[in-house]
Amino acid sequence: MSQFDDAIEVQGARVHNLKNIDVTIPREKLVVITGLSGSGKSSLAFDTIYAEGQRRYIETFSAYARQFLGSLERPDVDKIDGLSPVIAIEQKTTSKSPRSTVGTITEIYDFLRLLFARASDAYSYNTGEKMVSYSDEQIKDLIMESFVGKRINILAPVIRSRKGHYRELFEQIAKQGFVKVRTDGEIVDLEKGMKLDRYKTHDIEIVIDRLKIEDSTDNEKRLMESINTAMYHGDDVLMVIDQDSNAVRYFSRNLMCPSSGISYPNPEPNNFSFNSPKGACHKCNGIGELYVVNENKIVPDTSLSIKNGAIAPHGPQKKSWIFKQFETIAQRFEFSLSDAWKDIPDEAKNIILYGGKDKFTVESKLLGVARDYNIDFEGVANFIENQHKSNSTSLVRWAREYMDKVQCPTCEGSRLKKESLYFKIDGKSIAELVAMDIIELGEWFEGLSTRLTNTQQKIAEEIIKEIKNRVQFLLDVGLTYLSLNRSSKSLSGGEAQRIRLATQIGSQLVGVLYILDEPSIGLHQRDNEKLINSLVSLRDVGNSVIVVEHDKDMIERADHVIDIGPFAGKHGGEIISEGTPSALLKQSTLTAEYLNGNKEIEIPKKRREGNGKQIVLKGCTGNNLKNVTIEIPLGKMIGVTGVSGSGKSTLINETLYPIMNAHYFNGVKKPMPYKSIKGLEHIDKVIDINQSPIGRTPRSNPATYTKTFDEIRSLFAKIPEAMIRGYKPGRFSFNVKGGRCETCQGAGLRVIEMNFLPDVYVECETCQGKRFNRETLEIRYKGKSISDVLNMTINEATDFFEHIPKIYRKLKTIKDVGLGYITLGQQSTTLSGGEAQRIKLATELSKRDTGNTFYILDEPTTGLHFEDINVLLKVLNKLVNKGNTVLIIEHNLDVIKTVDYIIDIGYEGGKGGGKIVAKGTPEDIIKDKKSYTAKFLTKELN
């Protein structure tokens, strides 16, 4: 038995690079697995423990059910004991759909919809009165009470304020045996061929019955039958008219406004969903935004003539049908295509932009004959709108150049139908609640029960309890500044992961094994504390928590730390220490040396002065930025810091990068609003290295991703033997027919399907896993075939190709970022997050720098160990020493303390952020008393 009473025992794990390891993980504790990037942490946590937990869960289904689920592979491990149900919260960012919001991911919105469907009051959008609804029995009693001794007409409304002549409708009514109708307030007899003015709006009701209300059983029975008939024809609404005073009253089985008679359907949860046709605004289909044509973009310069290209989408005059139309319009309105746009008559402008039909005659002075012309023109603006609705991505992109994205005018961005916005609880509609910050929402729900009626309280009690719990947890993981209507595609990776964590903790499960992949990514030190506390509370309820993490604070707060190493890739995969954090500090492993201070990332002796030039960006107001102006000194390494949600990505990724990309490379992405930018002439090009993952298919590998393989294939095609045989570079690709082994189609493996057991992968018997056919493998360079090259590590390949500059430069960069141990042909799916991030980095860094290049890196330390960060900083410092500028958005203090210049944004996230708090060298920043970054940086610098 292990040293723990209750533990997960893993024996003989050999997944990826794990070296047949045995490990004991205590249950109901916070366990951190750490080690170099690529040492095998994720292989142990996700590919062994999580994969086995998933597989066992699926094994509990019948063989019949499993065949539909796609069976999971059994990880390469001898045995795992003590495994409980596993839930993994990985780094995968959330859905990019415009329909996904914070409310829908956390499921709070689903509870809100239920709350509004069951406990809200409806109000009329015409008069603001509270809506009422009755049963047939109640309607009968009300009529008997209110109209006793009076003569009344009972009517069924069929048409409400709509145009038309309604001849067919009158015929239909007559066929059903009715003799009178009330049109526009007047009761008339039905006649043959009767019709109304088709261009006016009308109200039409069928007269069902005329009777005097008396207290007798016959009278009551007759009234009940009339009510039923009226409800049938009037779509659950009926009208009662007092014959003496002509006063009208409406009654309905649905919700109805007592004075204007408009009715709403009884509310269901999907009446409040913007993803259902029942609730979505019909104009924007529940997106809340629309693209509309902007006339100023179609005619940017009104002093130009049509001939010289005033109409931007069509350019200067050429021989085409469209310009013939313009000429015809010019004849009709007596102007010339050489006239400036601003001098053309408004009527003509309207036809050119929005189309029209017209016939006219022109008399020829010379011949004395008249000629007829027809104008039938769609209009430039309408044409652009129609292209925007097409299925072609390029046409849509073209159309958007002349359009603006605006808030939908019908629902004002709330995404819902008008009716849905008039259901209220305590005076607030569902749209008003989702627009609040989470912190405000929490306060509103706090005292809600006391403000509801007794019935509402009974119905809503459970729902409100669920909502409060979920809101509280979002507050606990530091997401106070989000609102529920925030679109999920605008969330950062860290925010998205913490929202999923909030959803999990909201479910209050016990006895579960949670595995998290670096939850601290994108989190400021200040919020890290909150995150660790949430994980501790998850453990205290009775769950086991395993975290794959490099964060110092997280390692120090853990109950048990497992360090995997000693190095990465094939030199890793062993357990080099396990025990409490204090026991780890006494070891001599890389992790321990950084934690106990024997090794550290050096603080530079002096900060770089830069080249004296700068880029000045003024007046940025995107998302939560409050008219921000920044000066970016060039020739330095710059850090952009600030708490999560303060506006760093909006300022750099959404404003600065699109402006620069459009300037140097004609990029199409539209920057967030800003006033002006100066200094772009001091830079030659911009390179952006963001967080999106590299190709995740088994056919993608470091060689293909960095484009090195293209160069290697061209090299093989130039070998004399290959030229004699007429082989082109495509012959050496394992993705196309010709050179690859056709048995396994270049995969090197064959899949054997086992029905309800997991698929088995076996080495292809034709090529023995070499991926190519015999003829291709006969071509050799320095004695190595193309397959041998793919199996080389980057370190071996760098020496092997050292005389081929194009290949050498790319391989050398991959080696410099610390990935010398991976092979050229390693499948991208088996790379760790940190390795993928650095391959991407190497690809961008291997592009020739001009000594004047501007690099933007978004949290490059994702997935990196202290030692890896050290290696990365050396590479970045080399770039800056050549004169380039490197701008890093980062929370990691090891990086922040080494940069030359910091721009700190804050103070808080969300509405409380969006201002520049401090700027200058790290030594200047720590003098600022208000900045959160300064507080944590002071500890690092001293």
Image (cartoon, grey):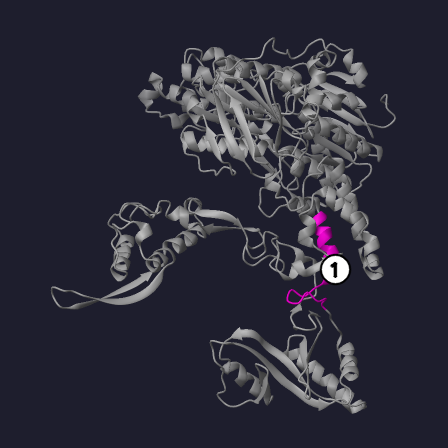
Indicate whether 795 appears above or below 769.
above
Q: Mark 1 points at which residue?
A: 120
**Considering the image in quadrants, where does the N terminus appear?**
top right
Indicate whether 661 appears above or below 242.
above
Name the residue at 72% across, 52% down. 112
Q: Around disc 1, counting alpha carbons within 10 Å, would you say few (fewer than 14), some (14 to 19), or many (20 or more)?
A: many
- Amino acid type indicated by mark 1: Ser
In this orientation, which residue lies closer to the viewer: 68 or 687?
Answer: 687
Name the residue at 77% across, 25% down. 31
Which residues, given as a range, are shown in magenta?
108-131
Residue 499, horizontal then vertical, whole percent? 69, 38
Q: In which quarter of the image is residue 782?
A: top left
Residue 101, horizontal then vertical, whole percent? 64, 45
Q: Is residue 119 magenta?
A: yes
Residue sticking out furthest to the front = 343
Residue sticking out furthest to the left = 366
